[in-house]
Image: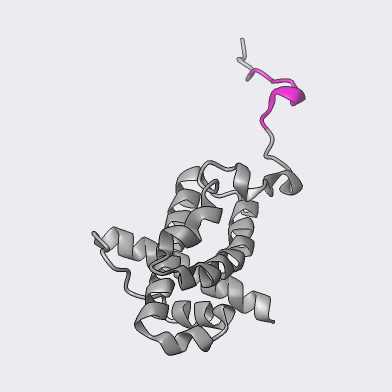
Amino acid sequence: MAVHPRKTKPGTVPQPAPRAQAAVALDRLPFGKDIDGWPRQWMGFAKDVPPGEHLVQCFRPFLHHLIKRQLSKTTMRKHVTNLWVLGGEIIRKLNDTPSLRKVPIDDLVFEVVEDGGPLPYGCDSEEEGRSFESTCRKLRRFLEQQRL
């Protein structure tokens, strides 16, 4: 007697979410809830808040792009964390080099990530460093496509 594999009903086979549904609002995701608070977290001085808010505006389209790619929660969380670190490093650069405050934030972000990003302050491991560089490279490629 031949054994036949069991067939499942078409409705029970898991289907990936359509692309349109994958673009969930960033604020609804567990790792994106505090993104609007980043400028205050980065702030060293009150004058750091406006550039911080502009940084968040620069990062949002990139985060939506990553969401559309349906990356795992762990990968998304790493990218979000790395963007938070990148924003802090850019604010640090603005405080260390006041003349950079005259440079448009969009241009400054592109310049900073152009060569793999800055060396993050307090990077504890080589793995964290590689993850940070990976996010910076992805952001750079995304920004290059946006500029075309």
Is 10 included in the stretch rendered in magenta? yes
User: Foreground residue, 5 or 73?
Assistant: 73
Q: Which residues are magenta?
A: 6-14
Rendering coords of residue 99 (x, y %): 44, 90
**Taking 77 as reference, is 88 above or below it?**
below
x and y percentages locating residue 31 in the rendered image:
50, 46
Q: Tell me which secondary structure the magenta stretch mostly adopts.
A: loop
Q: Image quadrant of residue 50?
A: bottom right
Q: Is residue 84 left or right of residue 11?
A: left
The foreground one among 7 and 137 is 137
* Colour scheme employed for the rendering of this structure: one colour
Q: Does 63 appear above or below 114? A: above
Q: Is residue 103 magenta?
A: no
At x 51%, y 49%, the residue is 34
Question: Quarter of the image containing the N terminus?
Answer: top right
Q: Residue 91's quadrant in the figure?
A: bottom left
Image point 51% across, 54% down: which residue? Answer: 37
Residue 62 is situated, as x and y percent measured from the top left of the image, at: 60, 63
- Asked which quadrant contains residue 16, the reply is top right
User: If the image is split into quadrants, where does the C terminus sit?
Assistant: bottom right
Q: Nearer the viewer, residue 114 or 19?
A: 114
**Which residue is the extreme one toward the top?**
1
Q: Which of the two residues, 142 or 49, is positioned nearer the viewer here?
A: 49
Looking at the rendered structure, the number of numbered marks drawn on it comes to 0
Please provide percent x and percent y for residue 147.
66, 80
Outermost residue on the front side: it is 46
The residue drawn where x is 61% and y is 61% is 60
